[in-house]
Amino acid sequence: MAVLIWAGVLAFCGLAVWSRRFVVLSRSRRPDGTDRDRKSSQILDERLVGGDIDPKERWCLRELIGGDPTPTAAAGRR
């Protein structure tokens, strides 16, 4: 009998952890991916301005992430 109680407790805890994880992950995802693309674009622009990558490499990487390869406004700052 005690084994069934512990199994129920473990199942309940597992369900609680899973549901919490599901809610947190579903809120952080964007269906269109715009937030992620904007952030990756800014990182590439910062690397270009800092001299870590050259314009040709930035162009190729920007095409790989599926965005517009033209520089954003962040590239001119600093």
Image (tube, rainbow, N blue to C red):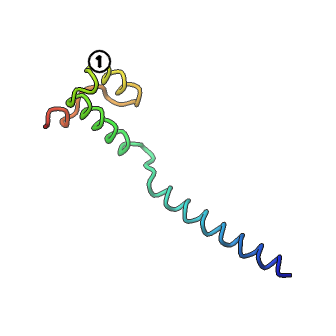
Q: Quadrant of residue 59?
A: top left
The residue positioned farthest toward the top in the image shown:
56
* Location of the N terminus (image quadrant): bottom right
The residue positioned farthest toward the right in the image shown:
1
Say above or below: 33 vs 57: below
Say above or below: 15 vs 67: below
Task: Residue at 75%, 75% (x, y): give it.
Answer: 8
Q: Residues within 10 Å of mark 1 (few under 14, many from 20)?
A: few
Task: Residue at 55%, 61% (x, y): give it.
Answer: 21
Q: Which residue type carries mark 1?
A: Lys
Q: Nearer the viewer, residue 7 or 24?
A: 7
Q: Quadrant of residue 18?
A: bottom right
Q: Which residue is mark 1?
A: 56
Task: Residue at 30%, 37% (x, y): give it.
Answer: 43
Say above or below: 47 vs 35: above
Q: Quadrant of residue 34?
A: top left
Task: Residue at 24%, 35% (x, y): give it.
Answer: 46
Q: So how many labels did they put on this image?
A: 1
| Residue 57 shown left or right of residue 12 in the figure | left
Residue 16 x/y as whole percent: 61, 69
Residue 28 x/y as whole percent: 44, 54
| Residue 43 shown left or right of residue 24 in the figure | left
Residue 11 x/y as whole percent: 72, 70
Residue 78 x/y as whole percent: 13, 37
| Residue 26 shown left or right of residue 16 in the figure | left
Secondary structure of the residue carrying tag 1 is helix
